[in-house]
Image (cartoon, rainbow, N blue to C red):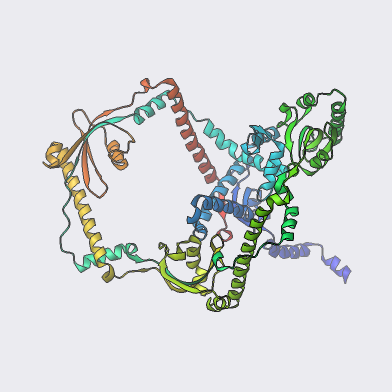
């Protein structure tokens, strides 16, 4: 049998069979291997190979295309960062349900796609970022500096505190990739410049003033014309969104507060003493050690043994009688954060340094030199210059503080226990709060109906409102999880009734509809009167005659561009009007708040005077204009680069 299989596994028949077997396999493997978007990716940016820019996109030629993917994990991490930023900016107004909109997800994805397009463009352009450039950029980040200088210990501590935590090697690669994708747009932005001719033109425009005379036209009388049912019905249908009844809910809730708890019993003396012993470090100063070091780095792929020998030689020199440790550090240390200070690390407490460094330092005697000591940064030579012993306050001195803390902890525990018991009981019967509240002696209250805009009772809390209007509580009719609305103040709610948003019938809003129609008629009449006034002005009549005897005429001499006068909208209209021809003003109109119309005449235009601008100010403005031009050019570059590549998005992964 085996021999027959061997005999039939060669030749064209076997080739056909193997080919047929491979077809379903192609639909099982991750499509990213075949030039597809991949099962776990949200988007892919593709481009034909740089050596065959006209390569077609069909398979198998598409396997040659260069590509960058936005993974699902990458998108979720960036989206979570955007969520945290929005929560910080909006505070209590932040609505997590609204933030989950597809528009927000597409906005975040667009940023990632732009970055991948830039990375692909950098690959095709052969952009390379050196180790020195990465190191220089990292050392310039203020978060890694102490007193304006890069500090290696702070650098490592900050990376460890990130979510997720990163190693220095991982952060190096992150910075390298960021620099690679930003170098081209940054270079384009930095290359922008403004010529003297352009600058003078911009200064003449930005410094332009206009001599204007304007007149407020009489208010249009109130509309009193008859309004038919057909007019009202037509307006109601065309503006249905203006006459909606908002979505409303009625809830029942159980409130748990610290005031519902009995007073805590007196704290146990033995428990206080145990707490004192466990937290003794809080009540005193820890031991501190004044240290210096010399660092000999071990670069990736470098000779670790040679670095260790060099560190051992430096340790021997530093330990010699009369040796100047600071001078050796300035000459040989490779730690830029402490080298210029003679290796001085300042006062070090336990927990500040990496474990091998700290273990060696806290085992030394004052004046001792020890080394080499190995850490992830390289080999260290340590010098302990001084020891400051720790101190602790006695139990009797801090007893009252511990007692207050214990009482607060007992109250919090009792509150947590009550909330937990209530939650467990509600979970047993989530369709009603009454049984659980009755067993614990709590009161069930009702609130509503209220809308999202109402602020009554506990519904003033954004957290309660978000839960009350959530699809889950509305559709299921079950109780919520505990909602914290203040310190030791929580509620559980359940939606009793839900009234979806709906158009209010015309009969109910007839008065509002009539008011809207009359306001619209009056506004249109005011615009028509202003347009008629403009026609008369253009025909040669004087502004005073057109405006009428009771009109308010206001001359505005030397009105500057961009001034919020008479209003920002009016200023834009005035400066959008054409410059007057010789002896012939140009005219225009604008609306004031409330709908009243004004007409104006531009009598003269006075360009700005670049020659009167001091050189320092001129230089500063040139830089600002160049930065604006550079930012626009960089943005245009990103848009053009993205347009050159093929972008595929898998929205089901968002």
Picture quarter containing residue 32?
Answer: bottom right
User: Dividing the image into 4 quarters, which one contains the N terminus?
Assistant: bottom right
User: Dividing the image into 4 quarters, which one contains the C terminus?
Assistant: bottom right
Q: Residue at x 38, y 66 (%)?
A: 246
In-front residue for pair 584/159 = 159
The answer to whether 613 is drawn above or below residue 246 in the figure is above
Q: Is residue 39 left or right of residue 92?
A: right
Kindly tell me whether residue 483 is visible in this rendering: no
Q: Residue at x 81, y 35 (%)?
A: 380
The answer to whether 486 is drawn above or below residue 136 in the figure is below
Q: Is residue 92 left or right of residue 159?
A: left
In-front residue for pair 271/554 = 271
Q: Position of residue 535 (x, y in %)?
A: 17, 42
Q: Is residue 177 left or right of residue 457?
A: right
Q: Residue at x 81, y 24 (%)?
A: 324
Task: In the displayed orientation, state which residue is furthest to the front.
Answer: 396
Q: Position of residue 616 (x, y in %)?
A: 45, 22
Q: Is residue 344 left or right of residue 439?
A: right
């Amino acid at each position: 049998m085996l021999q027959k299989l061997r005999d039939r596994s060669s030749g064209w028949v076997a080739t056909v069979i193997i080919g047929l077997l491979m077809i379903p396999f192609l639909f099982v493997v991750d499509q990213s291997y075949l030039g597809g978007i991949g099962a776990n990716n949200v988007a892919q940016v593709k481009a034909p190979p740089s050596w065959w820019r006209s390569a077609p996109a069909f398979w198998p030629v598409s396997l040659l295309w260069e590509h960058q993917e936005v993974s699902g994990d990458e998108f979720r991490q960036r989206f979570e960062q955007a969520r945290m930023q929005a929560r910080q900016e909006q505070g209590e107004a932040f609505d997590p349900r609204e933030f989950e909109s597809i528009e927000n997800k597409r906005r975040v994805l667009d940023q990632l796609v732009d970055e991948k397009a830039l990375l692909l463009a950098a690959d095709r352009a052969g952009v390379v970022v050196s180790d020195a450039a990465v190191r220089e950029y990292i050392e310039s980040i203020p978060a890694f500096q102490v007193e304006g200088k890069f500090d290696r210990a702070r650098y490592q501590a900050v990376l460890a505190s990130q979510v997720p935590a990163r190693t220095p090697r991982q952060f190096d690669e992150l910075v390298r990739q960021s620099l690679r994708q930003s170098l081209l747009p940054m270079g384009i932005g930095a290359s922008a410049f403004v010529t003297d001719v352009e600058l003078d033109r911009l200064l003449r425009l930005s410094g332009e003033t206009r001599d204007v005379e304007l007149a407020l036209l009489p208010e249009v009388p109130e509309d009193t014309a008859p309004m038919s049912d057909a007019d009202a019905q037509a307006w109601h249908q065309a503006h249905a969104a203006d006459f909606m009844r908002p979505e409303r809910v009625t809830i029942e809730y159980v409130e748990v507060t610290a005031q519902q708890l009995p007073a805590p019993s007196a704290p146990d003396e033995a428990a206080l003493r145990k707490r004192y012993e466990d937290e003794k470090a809080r009540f005193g100063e820890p031991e501190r050690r004044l240290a210096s070091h010399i660092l000999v780095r071990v670069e990736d792929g470098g000779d670790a043994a040679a670095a260790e020998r060099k560190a051992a030689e430096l340790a021997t020199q530093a330990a010699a009688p009369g040796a100047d440790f600071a001078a050796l550090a300035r000459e040989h240390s490779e730690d830029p954060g402490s080298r210029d200070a003679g290796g001085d690390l300042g006062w070090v407490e336990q927990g500040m340094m990496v474990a091998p460094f700290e273990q060696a330092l806290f085992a030394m005697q004052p004046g001792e030199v020890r080394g080499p000591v190995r850490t992830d940064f390289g080999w260290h030579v340590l010098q302990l210059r001084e020891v400051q012993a720790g101190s602790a306050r006695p139990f009797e001195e801090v007893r009252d503080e511990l007692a207050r803390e214990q009482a607060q902890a007992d109250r919090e525990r009792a509150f947590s226990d009550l909330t937990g018991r209530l939650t467990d009981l509600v979970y047993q019967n989530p369709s009603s709060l009454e049984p659980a509240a009755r067993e614990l002696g709590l009161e069930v209250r009702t609130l509503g109906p209220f809308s999202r805009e109402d602020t009554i009772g506990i519904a003033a809390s954004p957290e309660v409102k978000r839960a009350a209007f959530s699809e889950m509580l509305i559709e299921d009719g079950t109780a919520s999880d505990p909602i914290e609305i203040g310190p030791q103040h929580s509620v559980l709610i359940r939606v009793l009734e839900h009234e979806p948003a709906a158009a209010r019938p015309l009969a109910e809003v007839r008065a509002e509809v009539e008011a809207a129609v009359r306001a619209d008629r009056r506004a249109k009449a005011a615009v028509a009167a202003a347009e008629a006034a403009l026609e008369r002005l253009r025909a040669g009549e004087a502004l005073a005659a057109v405006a009428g005897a009771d009109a308010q005429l206001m001359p505005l001499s030397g009105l500057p561009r961009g001034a919020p006068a008479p209003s920002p909208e009016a200023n834009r209209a005035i400066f959008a009007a054409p410059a007057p021809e010789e002896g012939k003003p140009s005219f225009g109109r604008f609306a004031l708040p409330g709908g009243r119309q004004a007409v104006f005449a531009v009598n003269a235009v006075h360009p700005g005077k670049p020659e009167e601008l001091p050189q320092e100010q001129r230089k500063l403005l040139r830089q600002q204009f160049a930065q604006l031009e550079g930012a626009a050019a960089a943005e245009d570059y990103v848009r053009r680069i993205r347009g050159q590549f093929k972008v595929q998005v898998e929205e089901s992964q968002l």
